[in-house]
Image: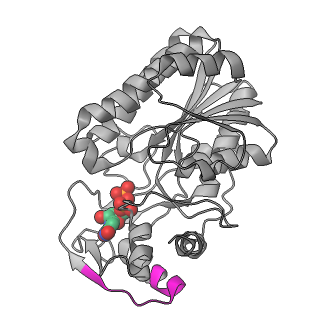
Amino acid sequence: MRVLVTGGAGYIGSHVVKALGERGHEIAVYDNLSSGNRWAVLYGDLIHAELEDSNVLKSVLVNFKPDAVMHFAAHIIVPESVRNPLKYYLNNTVNTINLLRLMRECNVGLFVFSSTAAVYGIVETAPVPEGAPLHPINPYGTSKMMTESVLADLALADQDFRYTSLRYFNVAGADGSGRIGQAYRESTHLITRSLKTAKGEFPKLEIFGTDYPTPDGTCIRDYIHVDDLADAHILALDYLTGGGGSQVMNCGYGHGYSVRQVVEMAKKVTGVDFRAEDAPRREGDPPELVADSRKLKNMLGWKPGFDDLEYIIKTAWQWERKRS
Ligand code: UDP
């Protein structure tokens, strides 16, 4: 297969490129390197260009002639999306629509889309199934939800277009051999922040909210290892190539860990008893966000290989320690 991977130099994209490369697919990565890195592209050619540049994008579609496009290029910082919504709607929604238009002009009909559990908003049910109502609470989640609507309409109207939209839960960990990992310096994610605190980059970790209706009062999330997520993308591609119809699927393990459990595990893995302080709730955090991932397992045959918080944090720590 020839696969065009937008955002393939980023955290999740680079792990998918690795998985595609290991399976012998031909890859072209399209990335503006705004948050990705050239060294993260382990397979295929890198085209350093803007997604909004229709001329370059079209020439890549014409010349590389991909069988499928996997689309990771997006902005993903929730607070930034609140401050600067147009940036999110323009890149995550408008640029994706433009990519779809060019794909169809060039007769490319298979699409794997990076979506997010943020489309659900504050959920009442755990685990949350794909059919749950979508009530995103920030422009990031809305920008992804809008794109999902476009995809659904396009697939209805156009027999030759099929897609899978993969809704990611809390992606974490790094390549087991330590070559690639989360390289975004300003990451505010819990595991990255905990490890950077263990490294001494921050004086303390704040635990945002300790009075949630959960067993230990802190929020519960479904942490999925990035290599298992990459594997889900390979299966989604195989499914589409094999003639499968358009689908939306949750990507998570179906169970979660509390913030305190993650912090304890980060202390165990690093061997550093770093400072972790109780702090007020962070706005917009649902108490529990766990994937009902039966669809991914039953329909695609996905079998997680790394459903183990210790392994997730170990690989993230191995990666984090390699970084200056
Ligand atoms: N969290 C925390 N301290 C931090 C970062 C995150 O207590 O420094 C909590 C956050 O409030 C949420 C959970 O950890 O309950 C996971 O947050 P993260 O930002 O990693 O992912 P999200 O679920 O928001 O996508």
Quadrant the N terminus occupies: top right
Residue that protrudes farthest toward the right in the picture? 24
Residue 71, percent across and down?
54, 34
Q: Which residue is drawn at the image coordinates 52% and 71% (left, top)?
A: 320
Query: Which portion, as a residue range, is magenta?
Result: 266-277
Which color scheme is applied? one colour
- Classify residue 66 as left or right of residue 142: right
Q: Is residue 217 magenta?
A: no
Q: How many marks?
A: 0
Please identify the quarter of the rendering in which residue 198 is found. bottom left
Q: Which residue occupies the foreground of this view, 295 or 263?
A: 263
Quarter of image, ligand 1? bottom left
Please identify the quarter of the rendering in which residue 126 is found. bottom left
Residue 280, percent across and down?
17, 70
Q: Which residue is drawn at the image coordinates 47% and 28% (left, top)?
A: 51
Q: Which residue is drawn at the image coordinates 39% and 60% (left, top)?
A: 187
Residue 158, percent across and down?
56, 10
Quick check: 1 above or below 233? above
For the question of whether residue 225 can be seen, the reply is yes
- Classify residue 78 as left or right of residue 59: left
Q: Which residue occupies the foreground of this view, 61 or 122?
A: 61
Q: Which residue occupies the foreground of this view, 103 or 50?
A: 50
Quick check: 287 above or below 166? below
Residue 313, percent across and down?
54, 73
For the question of whether residue 217 can be seen, the reply is no
